[in-house]
Amino acid sequence: MRKSILTALAVLALSGTAFADVIKVGVVGPFSGPFAIQGKNFKAGIDAWMALNGNKVGDDEIEIVYRDVPQADPAQAKALAQELVVKEGVQYLAGFYFTPDAMAVTPLLEQANVPLVVMNAATSAIVTKSPLVVRTSFTTWQTSAPMAKVAKERGVKKVITVVSDYGPGVDSENAFKTTFTAEGGEVVDSIRMPLSTNDFSPIMQRVKDSGADAVFAFLPSGPTTLGFVKAYNDNGLAQAGIKFLAPGDLTQEADLPALGQAAEGLLTTFHYAVSHDSAENKKFVEAAHKAIGNPAELSFPAVGAYDGMHVIYKMIEATGGEQDAQKAVDAVKGMAWESPRGPVSIDPESRHITQNIYLREVAKAEDGTYYNKEIATFEKQGDPGLAAAK
Amino acid sequence: MAAVEHTSIAKPVQSARPNWLARDLIGVAVILAVAVLGYFLFPNNLALLTRILAIALLVLSIDLVTGFCGVATLGHAALFGAGAYAAGIAAVHWGITDPFLMIVIGAVGGAVAGLVSGAVILRGHGLAQLVLSIAVVHLFHEAANKASTYTGGSDGLAGISPDPIFGMFGFDLWGRTAYGFAVALLVIVFVLLRLLTRSPFGMLCRGIKEDPIRVRAMGASVHGTLLKMYVISGVVAGIGGALNAISTQVVGLDSLSFTLSAESLVMLVLGGTGSLYGALIGTVSFMWFEDFVSAANPFHWLTIVGALLIAVVLFAPRGLYGSAQLLLERFRGAGK
Amino acid sequence: MQTVFSVGIDALAYGMVLFVISIGLSVTMGLMRVVNLAHGAFAMIGGYIASYAAQTLGFGYALAVLVAVVGTILIAIPVERFLYRRIYGAPELTQVLMTIGITFCVIGIANYVFGPTLKTIPLPETLRGPVDLGFRTIAAHKLFAIACGVVVAAALWYLIEKTSFGVKLRASVDNAAMAASLGVRTKIVYAVSFAVAVGLAAFGGIVGAELLPIEPYYALRYMVTFLVVVSVGGAGSIPGALLACLLLGAIDTTGRYLLPEYGEFFFYLAVIAIVCVFPRGLLGRSK
């Protein structure tokens, strides 16, 4: 009798994860500091997923371990990822708001036997750094390129691009320029401004002097977009009829209450608007609002995190809770589902998400708040950035 | 701060000689003991410990100019980042992946950055000096952002893969090699700095801090001495940066940032300026505390760190090490 | 020519906004000799209170500003009494440690209480929208900021140079022991000047909110800018700070117009050049 119990225990111990177990997911993101809002959205998306789908896959309980990297800091991100894998024993790494942080972690994955699900970081090249990376967010190329088509359709001939001088800004500029030139348009000037710019009046003067019909802009979500959009209005560019085009980072929902009237009518292209009209999204928004507390704070990183959790659950299901990174990643290649943002799938080749990109206009709702109103759809967009890099 | 220095300066040099040797040996033994203890207590957290050691080199380097020479700087990460980028660029673009060689390149990079930034920063005093140092670190940061062909810009310089040490110990996920390498580097640098701060040159620096006019009257060159110290400080910071590049295999723009500069100055003041032990204690306690509270509550830990800093100023105004030493002396004084 | 005028106006507006936000720091740093890195934190508190008063409580703009300035001063009183009083005259690095600690705390608390989103202070109708200057348009609130800058500069200059309080303040700063023995109650003088500095910070935070929006990280994000502006002007000198703001505003704005890609280089190289030529700041008081 005693012996049999011992054997049973030994079997249990040896088979380890195959039985009911706790599977840990390590999430790295900016939970404090200047980008705290985006980290908060990660958590809201994850909480929403777990509220709707339970915290168990099969018999395995899922536990999320959060680690904070307030600003892009690859060394810190890597040390934390190492800690998560070695000390906390996480089987999945996820999150990552900033590209350099995600890049820093990719060399670890193979040895750690851990897949990385990128929930935001938007530089195309990340997925090429390791075969164990899957991305459920978007790339700057993916969201910027369709805007060039919109510009062309709306009869814009000359555009000036204005971007923040850092990786994503340069990506966005290239994406727009390449596509717009291919469509037969002309980019008359390209301005890159330091990230720390506060006063955009001189930039607006440049835009005016350039004689362009439209300005294409990219700035990171947050405080600077407010100054930029206000400067666009205050310097009379709106009255002069110069159109404002940008990817949706500039009009993320969390910034809209602050932007207010100044943002009305701005055109942006993006993969997700909180206002997206679908049953799937209603369910998501309701759960996410509950998770985040203040509904006005809900923004795009939440949906990346929500779908990221979807992918991770699928991975756990496919591996039966065993730690097998390659098998887990293989299981989600080609996976297609109805996300809150619309129909999406994981491209088996690049492991990046294929999704609809929407053209939106900032509009005023009946209750006086502003929202991104989807007015056109570009269906099943892959990532043009990877192709361009080749 | 002043009292700490006086106790070491006031003693007659000859009788102190065997005394300091014994004390330094004990110091090194303590560092090694703590390092070994850290290895066994936190075998799963070596990445953090290695990072602490790299930053400790940066804080030591600030101590050289701030604690020993009285130069206030909020831009010292420029030297650290220069070392990190020098080592990183050598590895990625020129294929120099021998870790020892990378450390040397990092040290050279740091020294050059020390020379450049020292030449600028030493032109001011007090507040002006702080502002110059801030301007310098921002210029370095912008330059690295602009030179994205070499530095990877804001995406970071990835793809650094250092060779195994002696061809045997690789830099892997568990970070044992990196940790051992870091401990060895820190101890060597520490011993050298101990010797340096006791040398006539080190004494001259302390003299400049106390009274630059008198030192000038003695016929010594204040500016030249400080610049020399700045270059040495650059070497130390550069080694720290290179170590960071080797152990994390990536270099980001944050390593040249004002934030890192300010944070490491805070660590130094926290530990106590003007003593190498203070620098080490400040780094270890700040980074460990930050890691602990940010893991416990990733969302609101900043408040607690702020409270810690305030508490230190209120209750240990000389920094942790300085105040502990003062307490110890009082205790001894009462015993006599 | 029109462009030159236009950029000139932008430079003037930017410089004046900088001035309104940073001048409080010039008082703490130059007159009270405290390296107050928490200046931005007080400006942010002012912004938050104003935003709360205007948006949630529905106060008018002027009332919201008043409530915010008074509220921030009330919050600052215990901070001065229990924390700042301990670091008057302490080494600079100790002051840095303390004030950074305070800043961290304020950021954490603001993030907890108000959340990490941007907060705005709704402007009254008259300050909203562009004003036509004939050759170009400019935001009305920028003209308002310019006016505020002029008023603040004049009032402060008068307070420090012409009133008996100003005399006491300067006496306490130059030699606290001597001033005290001559019957100046230095503690009160310090407390009052601290309150003035904090009030100015709050006011600046509100007036500048259109350019530097209120969010929890505000306190650290703009710290360097404030510090640089004050030191270039010469800590404690009101005309110096004004001159520095206008000069740096002009350099920054022109740089961003001509070569936006190298804007950061322009600004900091100019700072280095100015500080090297005027080590005490443009119009700094000699010790």
Image (tube, coloured by chain):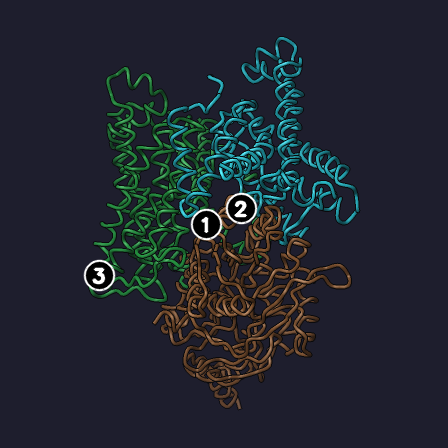
Q: Which residue is mark 3?
A: B95
For the N terminus of chain B, give its image quadrant: top left
Q: Give the cyan chain's letter.
A: C
| Marks 1/2 same chain | yes
Q: Give the brown chain's letter.
A: A
Residue B304 is tagged as none
- Left or right? Give the position of C100 relative to C70: left
Q: Which residue is mark 1?
A: A193
Label 3 to label 2: alpha-carbon separation: 42 Å
Give me the chain letter of mark 1: A
Give me the chain letter of mark 3: B
Give me the chain letter of mark 2: A
Percent from the top left, x then y, of residue B284? 43, 48
Residue C149 picture quarter: top right
Is the C-beta separation of discs 3 and 2 under 8 Å? no
Q: Which residue is mark 2?
A: A200
- For this rendering, which residue is in front, B258 or A345? A345
| Nearer to us: label 3 or label 1 | 1
Q: Give the green chain's letter.
A: B
| Nearer to us: label 3 or label 2 | 2
For the C terminus of chain B, give its image quadrant: top left
- Check disc 2 and report its element: helix, strand or loop: loop
Is the C-beta separation of discs 1 and 2 under 8 Å? yes
